[in-house]
Image (spheres, rainbow, N blue to C red):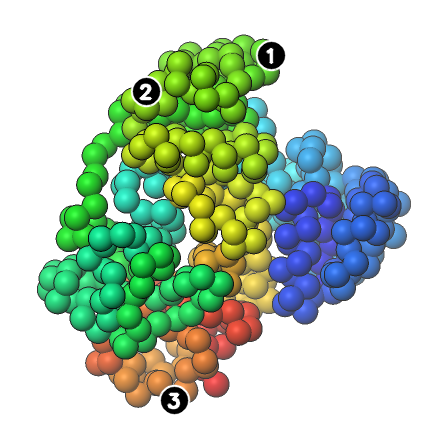
Amino acid sequence: MRIIVAGDGKVGLELLRLLSQEGHELVAIDSSGEVLKREMQNIDVMTVEGNCAAMATLQEAGIEQADILIAVTGSDEINLLCCLTAKKLHKSVHTIARVRSPEYTEQLYLMREDYGLSLIINPEKEAAEEISRLLQLPGFLKRETFAKGRVELVELLVGEGSLLQNIKLMDLPRILGPRCNVLVCAVIRGDDVFIPTGQTELKLGDHIYVTAPVTNLSLLLTRLGVTRRKIRHALLIGGGRVSYYLAQQLLLSGVQVKIIERDEARAAQLASMLPEASIILDDGASPQALEREGLTETDALATLTGLDEQNVITSMYGSALGVPLVVTKVDRMGSTGVIETLPVGSVVSPKETCSGHIVQYVRAMQNQAGAAVTLHRVADGRVEALEFVVNDQMRFIGEPLKNLHSHLRKNILISCITHRGKTVIPDGNAHYEVNDTVIVINGRESPILQFNDIFQ
């Protein structure tokens, strides 16, 4: 497909990289020709310098022949105007806009058709929702939901003294007990990411991704001896949009929220927007400020400034002081693999969350029947977890999974099946039927655009 990406920031570059890997014809628009030249060297993309909201620029980029326009500049207003102009020039183009300002959230969903928007993306709000889920069930480093919340993919660390250390996966039911039905579907070990087998032995330091019905998650943590307690107080470093959206959700859950913000004008704005939160005007990177504001007494620390390095260092400091729950926001460092080796708790990347949702939309456009309804990229983007709803065009309906091994592509795992609201971790005798939900793990040998792509 022909896709125009307007905006050359972190999200724009990540989208161009991902969509280039999937073979799309790409055009990048940015107001800075220097940035375009520097950043696009390793991506197969045509570039256009100019204002993406201007008719002339969009026409030069070939809007009349485009299938999708994605507007992800740093300005909500420019993104909206870009989509509106694109629709005026080409009525059938699909438009996606990144809109981050809380002031626009409600009215945009009411006026979505007026703006000609196919999809609205708010990376900061989505990141806040992800952090909120992590804080609601402490013990997991990452939580992704499927099947309307009935299934989750969670990340765990095999730490010192863990019951999982040196255990073969085939012996997991003995360790966890018969009612705790879960499946380890991916493992990060050092620089390697792989889909394990029953013979795989878990090692100290492994990051494992586990698929489970949501009702089993609390039981899983209990069986592993992970101490859980409901958080009562959260300390947020940085007063940006992620902090605002997260504070809103935590306050509704009865959690006391304290935000440390160094900019006086922003602190005053937050105080008026979040009257129930404590807003502290101070430097969140200062150990003295952190200790003054109760770092050692807080239940949860979330480092949410715009600087990855500051977030990482502050999270490491919090971990060293024994803060029970630590969450670190990163963007530039999100896919390097380095972050996994550091004691920074859970890692959340708005850029990667946003990019994953847009890639899912693009794939669905390519394959209207049989496309994934949910897509999550985990393990530094090297593994994809995809949710499909089975239709009558899909292969091997009703066939036991044990008969499909020779037909499945390499590094593919069917990890979960939901049938009439009941979720199971499938064994060899399980099968899927029309209207079932199937979760597939893809080791990223090549993209899975529709369900039948998992077969050779």
Q: Residues within 10 Å of mark 1 (few under 14, many from 20)?
A: few
Of helix, strand and loop, which one carries label 1?
helix
Can you tell which quarter of the image residue 88 is in?
A: top right
- CB-based contact (under 8 Å), mark 2 and mark 3: no
- Please tell me which residue lies in front, 357 or 444: 444
Q: Is residue 29 left or right of residue 415?
A: right
Can you tell which quarter of the image residue 279 is in?
A: top left
Of helix, strand and loop, which one carries label 2?
strand
**Mark closer to the chain start, 3 or 1:** 1
Q: Which residue is mark 2?
A: 256
> The residue under label 2 is which amino acid type?
Gln
Q: Residues within 10 Å of mark 2 (few under 14, many from 20)?
A: some
Q: Is residue 294 left or right of residue 331?
A: left
User: Where does residue 239 sit, x and y in percent of width and height?
Assistant: 52, 23
User: Where does residue 263 sit, x and y in percent of width and height?
Assistant: 59, 16
Q: Which residue is mark 3?
A: 406
- Seen in the picture, residue 316 relative to 67 is either above or below; the reply is above
User: Where does residue 95 sit, x and y in percent of width and height?
Assistant: 66, 49
Q: Is residue 309 left or right of residue 140?
A: right
- Seen in the picture, residue 259 relative to 433 is either above or below; the reply is above
Quadrant location of the N terminus in the rendered image: bottom right
**Alpha-carbon span between mark 3 and mark 1:** 62 Å
Question: Which residue is at 62% across, 40% downward?
Answer: 98
Q: Which residue is mark 1?
A: 265
> The residue under label 1 is which amino acid type?
Ala
